[in-house]
Image (cartoon, coloured by chain):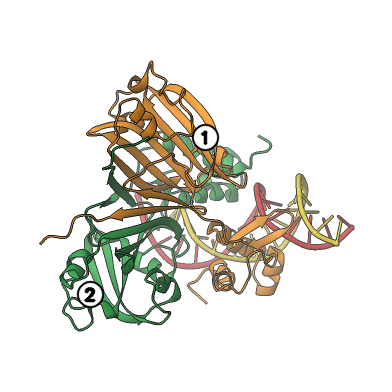
Chain colours: A green, B orange, C yellow, D red
Amino acid sequence: MTGQPRYLWVAELLRRPILNGEYAPGTRLPSRSRLARTHHVSEQVSRHALRLLVSEGLVEARPGSGYYVRPVPQIHRFSRTDRSSGSGVDPLDREDLGTLTVRVGDLVARRLTLRDGDPVYRTRCLGTANGAPVALHTAWEPVVLTQGTLRTPADADPGSGVLDRLGAAGVIIDRVVEEVGVRPLREPEASLLKLAPGRPALVVERTHYNGQRPVETSDLVGSVEHCRLLYRLSLARPQRR
Amino acid sequence: MTGQPRYLWVAELLRRPILNGEYAPGTRLPSRSRLARTHHVSEQVSRHALRLLVSEGLVEARPGSGYYVRPVPQIHRFSRTDRSSGSGVDPLDREDLGTLTVRVGDLVARRLTLRDGDPVYRTRCLGTANGAPVALHTAWEPVVLTQGTLRTPADADPGSGVLDRLGAAGVIIDRVVEEVGVRPLREPEASLLKLAPGRPALVVERTHYNGQRPVETSDLVGSVEHCRLLYRLSLARPQRR
DNA sequence: AAGTGGTCTAGACCACTAT
DNA sequence: TAGTGGTCTAGACCACTTA
């Protein structure tokens, strides 16, 4: 009872039955004042414990109502294989946010081996499920690639994939590199996804290549709770040695 | 000034210069009491703001000393391609934690299409950099696959990959499926990685297949700050339609 | 009207670090 | 020894939900 802070002790008392499935999702937890009374701690301690569980994603706070065991979130799997590469938000409903011509920033410039400030098309698209935003796809593509054709991101059918669109423009995509990580949400993303800035998000930085030349790059930003990535790889070559 | 809670306002005052690079990594921030005085808020508010920045990974608290802008963490990239599949912690130093024979739990049983309670080898391995743990790899493999041979995970050289080891035992791995997500750390993992339980971690659930038969599955659990996954896929087939 | 979560104040003690 | 972060107490007001 000594080394352990009390709010961790209270949190563990609640965490155990939640993880064991003894509290069904949707169950209302004791209120912070009731928790404080029954466990003989101050209200700040019970509050701290509950906020911890909220930050862990186990519990949801409904102001004015109570703390509830979170329903198991619906998980959306973004499928990747070595033979397809569609739009960024495949299993979801898409809400297209349009295409702009912008000057490329230095981070994206590096990914496309462009000069800082070169013009690119930036295309945004929101993946939603039951009307709720789940993932945000932002793609950048050099203007010079398709300028003057009807295959620019702005002109083409927004539902068509990059591979088809650029393929029709004579640019064959034969390689894709995806870098997966987690980072806090920044501002334009957070409000589009209706999440708080600073919350962690799963991020896929994907770059399509024609040989050694990068021709399109995009960020897929998805809420950590709802998004998973599924990579199906065939190990074609038999093992040597 | 009205709708916005004050601790968010204080946090934003500090977050901006950190993200803009105006505070160099390692810079000490004003202490919580100094922050409270200079911004005319209570100490709880400055504390709340600082804890928020800590939870976002921007700031590090050193008890007794102060709050410091976090040094940019060294990032380790776990490389995946469609022609290789080594041990789980490739770019790191490995610390082998041994192999046990255990009865499989239901989650892993499902991944290996075993019955709940069937015997499996469980092999653990810690990936470290500069002595600090970065990622934990836990692999499960049905005992029946290699029983009686010298190709069990317990007998073989721990440095050898699954593909080579099982290949030598006559089991050809030709497919791998990886599911990537983020979830809170659970207990045995958290202490091995020297992180707090409940903190989010990047998780790769990888399953190796021989045709339709899963022959080995593993979890790669890495700290969100230090780990990234790099998938290099070649889109061999030209596009049709 | 009562209860709830979100926020806030004004204190306090401890173990630790820095000097 | 002074300052620091971590934890804790005992209050309080507000907007909101619930009944």
Which residue, given by chain and number where applicable, does mark 2 sit on? A153
Q: Are marks 1 and 2 on the same chain?
A: no
Q: Position of residue B170 (x, y in %)?
A: 30, 26
Give the side of residue D1 with respect to residue B198, left or right. right
Residue A63 visible here: no
Residue A187 or residue A112, whichever sits in front: A112
Q: Look at the picture and state if B93 lies above or below C4.
A: above
Q: Quadrant of the C terminus of chain A?
A: top left
**In the rendered image, which quarter is residue B121 located in?**
top left
Relative to B239, is B103 on the left or the right? right
Q: CA distance from mark 1 to mark 2?
A: 48 Å
Say which of marks 1 and 2 sits in front. Answer: 2
In which chain is the residue bearing label 1?
Answer: B
Element type at mark 2: loop
Q: Crowding at label 2, few (<14), some or many (≥20) Cα neighbours within 10 Å?
A: many
Residue drawn 31% across the image and 47% down it: B82
Which quadrant holds residue A236? Answer: top left
Question: The residue under label 2 is which amino acid type?
Answer: Pro
Residue B191 found in image quarter: top right
| Labelled pair 1, 2 in contact (Cβ < 8 Å) | no
Q: Quadrant of the N terminus of chain A?
A: top right
Q: Is residue B10 above or below residue A204?
A: below
Q: Secondary structure at mark 1?
A: helix
Q: Report the residue at 34% width, 54% height from top.
A: B232
Label tally: 2
The amino acid on which the numbered mark 1 sits, given as a three-letter code, is Pro
Residue B188's label in the rendered image is: 1
Indicate the position of residue A134 as horizontal and vertical percent values: 31, 59
| Pointer 1 local density, CA inside 10 Å: few below 14, some 14–19, many at least 20 | few
Q: Position of residue A156 (x, y in %)?
A: 17, 74
